Amino acid sequence: MRRRLGFGFWAAVAWIGVVLLAALLADLLPFPRYDETLAGPPRSGPSGAHPLGTDGLGRDMLSRIVYGARVSLGVGIGAVLLGLGIGAPLGILAGYRRRATDAVIMAVNDVAQAFPALVFALAVVAFAGANLRNVLIVLGVLGVPSWTRLIRGATLTYAEREFVLAARVLGTRDRRILWREIVPNVAVPAASYAFIGMAVIVVAEGSLAFLGLSVQAPTPTWGGMINEGRTLMETAPHVVLAPSLVMFLTVLSFNLVGDRLRSLTDVRESGLEPVRQAAPAPVDVDPPHPVRDCLLQVEDLRTHFVTPRGVVKAVDGVSFTLERGKTLAIVGESGSGKSMLIRSILGLLPGNSVRSGNVYLTGDDLTTFGPAEMRSVLGPRLGTVFQDPMTALNPVRTIGTQVTEPLRVHLGMGRRQARSEAVRLLASVGIPDPERMLRRYPHQLSGGMRQRVTIAMALSCGPDVLFADEPTTALDVTIQDQVLRLLHRLREERDMAVVLVSHDLSVVARWADEVIVMYAGKVVERGPAGEVFARARMPYTEALLQAAPRLTDPVHHRLRVIPGRPPDLTDLPTGCAFQPRCPYAQDRCTIESPPLIQDGHHYACWHPRNPTTKNTATKADPVTPNPNNRPDEKNHVAPNPNTRPTEDSDHPSHTDSHQDKESRLPPDPNSSLAEDGHLPSRMDSRPDEASHPTPDPNNHPTEDAHITPNTNTRPAEDDHHPSRMDSRPDEASHPTPDPNNHPTEDAHITPNTDSSPAEVGHLPSDTNSRPGEKSHLTPDPNNRQTEAVEEVESGGR
Amino acid sequence: MIIVHRLVRLLVVLLVVTFLSYALLNLLPGDPVTQILGLSATEEARAQLRAQLGLDQPLLVRYLDWLGGLATGDFGESYITRMPVAAELAERLPVTLELLVVAQLIALGLAVPVGVAAARRAGRALDQVLTALSFALLSTPVFVLGVVLILVFAVTWQVVPATGWTPITLDLGWNLTSVILPAVTLGCGQLAVYARLLRTDLIATLQEDYITLARALGLSPRRILWRHALRPSAITLVTAVGLNLGALIGGTVIIETLFGLPGVGRLIVDSIFSRDYLTVQGGVVLISVGYVAVNFAVDLVYAAVDPRIRRA
């Protein structure tokens, strides 16, 4: 992505150009030579004849500065080229061929850093003679370790990228990879370093010259001129100021150019660039609505983000009410706006957002609160638990400090009182030995314990509403249940209301009183939990329900997915946002957006599902009526803890499945299952070895096995290998029968190699004579990266 | 175990650095004998002095001899002044150290508030001004900055002396006036570096979940910045301060020359000019040991800043 370089960049380029040009053409310029004494009266200030005045010997300052630029720029360019010329090959080599080379380079680097470079520059120049060549060589060579380190770093980031790994796996020769893949990519950062390096060298040369150890008089150098000018500081300050200013501008220009070039490639910085905000348009005028007598009332809440790509409607007109002692569940896929809804209610939004609508907490409109008022509500009245307890606690502060802080800030407790209260809180969320816990740091705790700590923090000031934003998603299954139970118990004990955000319907079904289903920032279905689950009207809700596997499912069911992906919020489809993925969409859906209407409960759909269609009845239906709606790994809806994502059974097309490993655009739900175990979709048939080209049912991701303990699980090492392997050696089937010889790097690209390559690879096919080619398409696409690619390219042979 | 490993590694680094510098200094053209006796001395007189100074021995023997002395704290004797090198260094070191410490205090004392202020309003006007200023400061060579500061404060306003040094044992007030200008000159460049580092890291930290959680707990922005975000953002800063302290022990040559301070850097430069190898070599040892020691100290500070590191 190209960004504007800005005025400063071009001004800097212009200055460098002027200095460079002047240095090159110095002999042609119409001013006295640098060593012509008494060209004007000594120590005279700037005048028409001498734009920068004269020095103590009456020499023209401008002329001296221009000739001085020859030394500065000459040394600068020469030393950078020398340093890069040696350092760049070393750095690329170290970054690309790690191990031994890398170790050597790092050791040398250690020494180089402890080595007093400036002292050596001084010593060498002093002993070997102060002339242009020596200065250039010394500064160039002293820079080599830094160049090596920088280029190594730049290479490292590319040597691990997919395209380089892919090239390696394909057997491309190293030299070719280096020249075609690495060098072009390292060139841009190298160029930016070169400019910064130029600045460093110009300063270094100036320092040497200042000490009298650069090119000797009468040749002028900037550093030397500054040193000489010091003696005249009281009578003729311009003699010292003129070269100082020129030097400053030159160094600044080199730095600026280098910095801007670097920021073009630096991902980290570019993310921090301030977003250029269009004046945030007021979103909507609040419609009048009654303020009801309830704990929390949200009315037509909207949150829009102004981004360079357009306005993102993250929350788009959400309303609900919540009573004390109830749990409201907010459900939807990732990116549906659930979390942003919570943040909008709490007022914890980033700077580029615009919020409208109203949030009433026992009748007070929080959207009218100033920052200080809001802070007095956050904590004492509204508590929050976030998704990932691993990142939600400050790593450098003890649990005790973090739990007591809200108590001391909001409730004004003293240190001791806060500590004993913290102990009580930690005990109430089921943390053993809370006294000791106070002295610990987050990294010493397990995920479940940390989440209990964040719950304790959220509860510390006795909130009326507890917002739990996917509180269990990052936790182990067994811990998930404990945490949810705890939340439920605390709700009962404290008579709070709970807003539970989740993508996991099994969570919601169990603990929620009310359910809101969100899609693309809008509420698409809302109502009492039992009713929504029993009679889902909106096809999206129905799909969510179907995507959640159940314990009652037969063991080898394929898990079901919602086809397509969540919409791009900057570019929503016209009409109903779900329409492109909806199997029941009709013309009207593409034109008009359905309003939220009440019929039993609230839903927004033109063609609601037949109320008699119980979700249980649809269980065994094959999903994906629309073949164009391809599942995507993003839409993991409900990895149900209770069901094992069953294995790969029916593979419509093998080349496809290979391809998707390559392109990461899985056309087959199985592959997304394989990728991260989410998004299971259910299918009926047990894999049939005789009729299926994918003979190995073990091809499912084994890591799921420990996440989802299932008593029905067959042993991971299946029983059928030995016999089959015996009965059919694989010599005929596979050109490279040994799966272990695949490059280990594959693991980075294809996470699902873990499906026991040994067995899978040796399982070329079923015993019933299948054609050799077909069978070796199948065993495990991931272990055969190279071949997979070839097969795809040659149209499956 | 890790500590032992590190110590061994650092010791090796020290050995390599001292040997390289010893060899380099001796292989370069130029000779202390000529420096002492002048160009007109006879060949016999030269040979005699050479033997007297031990310069007739092979390089490796001389190095090992010198290394043996080093182990007992004997840095050798200056060829020129015939003073023990250790004593000369000891006399100069306090000046350099005071300069360094004051400069770092000034730099850190300003960099932290500047970095925090810039990060807090990242992208806004104040941040842009501060960022531009620190960039300009970063691009100013120390001698340019020093000259300008002298011109303003010593020549024009005459609030501090332009050059010279008053030892702290003589008069504290005068000592401070003599150290303040060089320290500011030295500290300004560092200030720019530190502020930029801190700003970048703070902005990254402020995106962290635990900062959002702190906001959700209704804590004030000031409290969040100073108590929650600053410490996790300080690792890079600590590293930079450490490296600077190590690197600057010999790197204050320019400042010491400009302000006429009798520090280690000045001693090394003078010794280079007079081919006084052993004194230069002593300076190199001081610098390398300083670097190594600071590196070690930085590791300890890491643990204080980030408890996660304490496990190792």
Image (spheres, helix red, strand yellow):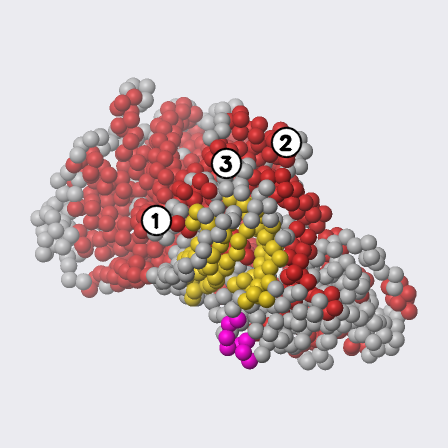
Looking at the rendered structure, the secondary structure element under dot 3 is helix
Q: Are marks 2 and 3 on the same chain?
A: yes
Within the magenta stretch, is there residue A778?
no
Question: What is the three-letter code of the residue carrying label 1?
Answer: Asp
Task: Between label 1 and label 3, give the one nearer the viewer.
Answer: 3
**Please, is residue B234 above or below residue A292 in the view?**
above
Could you tell me which residue is drawn at 34 percent across and 52 percent down? Answer: B124
Residue sitting farthest toward the top: B170
Looking at the rendered structure, the secondary structure element under dot 2 is helix
Q: Which residue is mark 2?
A: A434
Q: Are marks 1 and 2 on the same chain?
A: no
Q: Nearer the viewer, residue A335 or B158?
A: A335
Which mark sits nearer the N-terminus, 2 or 3? 3
Residue B264 picture location, percent across and down? 37, 31
Magenta residue span: A587-594
Q: Nearer the viewer, residue A148 or A447?
A: A447
Q: For the residue carrying disc 3, how many other residues have a C-alpha within 10 Å: few (<14), some (14-19), or many (20+)?
A: many
Task: Between label 1 and label 2, give the one nearer the viewer.
Answer: 2
Residue A784 picture location, percent across and down? 72, 68
Q: Nearer the viewer, residue A440 or A190?
A: A440
Q: Nearer the viewer, residue A707 or A238?
A: A707
Task: Between label 2 and label 3, give the one nearer the viewer.
Answer: 3
Could you tell me which residue is drawn at 65 percent across and 42 percent down? Answer: A489
Q: Which part of the image, by quadrant, shows the N terminus of chain A? A: bottom left
Q: Chain of mark 2?
A: A
Distance between the Cα atoms at labels 1 and 2?
A: 43 Å
Q: Which residue is mark 1?
A: B127
**Do we see residue A167 in this rendering?**
no
